[in-house]
Image (spheres, helix red, strand yellow):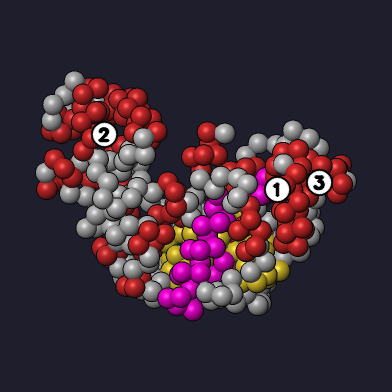
């Protein structure tokens, strides 16, 4: 594993292209850092026993989104063969084609009392960040470009949800997935789910989501997640999962090596808690022994083996199937085969499509809307 560093926030993703050709790709400087790292791998990894023709790029959350962004950047072509996008399909946070950083850059300069980008370059970082954070909310509220993420331009064609996947990336195998709760399960429930009957869980859903939503969603939830108490519907992720299904369908039109997963392992925290955003990372690195929340005798070791061996097989061959997971088909546009990792790990086909279509009517799937709640 080669771990990399790259510029973030106002240093890595702040479009200044309106102020001269030397800033042409300033809005994607962080991605250029990643590309530079991948070029280093191409030139040097054989000295460490690696294969430059068999590089897998993987990341979680924003790191997963960067895997997608690399697919949409011509300069990254040929630098990696496979990608793993963990909980990183969050379309609505990405800037759109045609946006410009000129207005917010001018606002930051005004806040700092400077009149040019050259002066801006010399501002100490703490002052620059403070000024940026002060003016940014206004631009976000107005739906204008506010930095912090890749901006479409001649170096980056844009998010595939807007422009589709570049055909030049079709040979890159992808593993794409999410976890059951994602952002909705960062905090515990205000009630005891572990000593709740099915009927009590349904009553909570009615109270939290409304009777109409409950009547439509509960049957679909039970069909998709029959081992869960109905109350878990209140924290089921849709922010990542909804766009992920479209992402996988579109990607699978391009090749026969697109794989999908769902991490749905109940973890032994507070008597039992559905997994949250980031909860699957220790299993990918096979270091669950360092994470107290994963410890469940007879379960942790098996799940770690299933996930780690799948990741290793995918990295080696582009196919995640292995001695622990024997029948995980690649997705097609009509058949989304999802490896559901749980105490009863299994492969499901289109198992939550209808649930995700309906849930959009009753809850925001935009992370910004959720954070404001």
Judged left or right of residue 141, residue 90 is: right
Label 1: how many Cα within 10 Å (few below 14, some 14–19, many 20+):
some
- The residue tagged 1 is 213
State the image quarter where residue 334 is shown: bottom right
Q: Count of labels shown?
A: 3
Q: Earlier in the sequence, mark 1 or mark 2?
A: 2
Q: Give the range drawn in magenta.
A: 235-260
Judged left or right of residue 158, residue 116 is: left
- The residue tagged 3 is 202
Q: Which residue is drawn at 54% across and 63% down?
A: 245
State the image quarter where residue 224 is shown: bottom right
Frontmost of labels 1 and 2 is: 1
Q: Where is residue 327 in the image (x, y as percent from the top left)?
A: 65, 77
Q: Can residue 46 be seen in this view?
A: no
- Is the residue under label 3 in contact with that under label 1 (CB below 8 Å)? no
- The residue tagged 2 is 104
Q: Nearer the viewer, residue 117 or 224?
A: 224
Q: Residue at x 27, y 46 (%)?
A: 99
Q: Where is residue 194 in the image (x, y as percent from the top left)?
A: 83, 43
Q: Which of marks 2 and 3 is nearer the N terminus?
A: 2
């Amino acid at each position: 594993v080669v771990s990399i560093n790259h510029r973030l926030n106002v240093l890595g993703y702040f479009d200044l292209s309106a102020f001269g050709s030397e800033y042409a790709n300033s809005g994607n400087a962080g991605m250029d850092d990643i590309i530079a790292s991948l070029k280093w791998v191409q030139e040097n990894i054989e000295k460490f026993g690696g294969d430059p023709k068999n590089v897998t790029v993987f990341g979680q959350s924003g790191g997963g989104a960067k895997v997608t962004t690399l697919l949409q950047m011509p300069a990254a072509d040929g630098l990696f063969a496979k990608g793993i996008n963990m909980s990183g399909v969050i379309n609505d946070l990405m800037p759109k084609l045609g946006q410009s950083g000129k207005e917010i850059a001018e606002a930051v300069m005004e806040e700092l009392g400077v009149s040019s980008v050259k002066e801006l370059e010399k501002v100490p970082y703490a002052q620059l960040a403070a000024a940026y954070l002060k003016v940014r909310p206004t631009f976000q509220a107005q739906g204008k470009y506010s930095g912090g993420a890749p901006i479409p331009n001649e170096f980056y064609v844009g998010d595939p949800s807007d422009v589709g996947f570049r055909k030049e990336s079709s040979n890159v195998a992808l593993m794409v997935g999410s976890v059951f709760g994602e952002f909705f399960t960062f905090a515990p429930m205000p009630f005891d789910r572990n000593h709740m009957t099915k009927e009590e869980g349904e009553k909570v859903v009615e109270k939290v989501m409304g009777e109409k939503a409950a009547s439509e969603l509960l049957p679909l939830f039970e069909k998709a997640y029959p081992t869960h108490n109905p109350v878990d519907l209140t924290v089921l992720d849709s922010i990542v999962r909804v766009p992920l299904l479209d992402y996988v369908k579109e990607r699978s039109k391009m090749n026969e090596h697109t794989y999908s997963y769902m991490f749905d392992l109940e973890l032994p925290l507070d008597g039992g808690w559905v997994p949250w955003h980031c909860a699957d990372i220790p299993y990918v690195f096979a270091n669950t022994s360092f994470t107290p929340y994963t410890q469940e005798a007879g379960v942790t070791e098996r799940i770690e083996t299933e996930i780690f061996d799948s990741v290793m097989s995918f990295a080696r061959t582009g196919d995640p199937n292995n001695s622990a997971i024997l029948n995980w088909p690649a997705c097609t546009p009509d058949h989304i085969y999802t490896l559901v990792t749980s105490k009863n790990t299994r492969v499901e086909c289109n198992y939550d499509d209808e649930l995700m279509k309906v849930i959009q009517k009753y809850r925001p799937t935009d992370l910004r809307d959720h954070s404001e709640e």
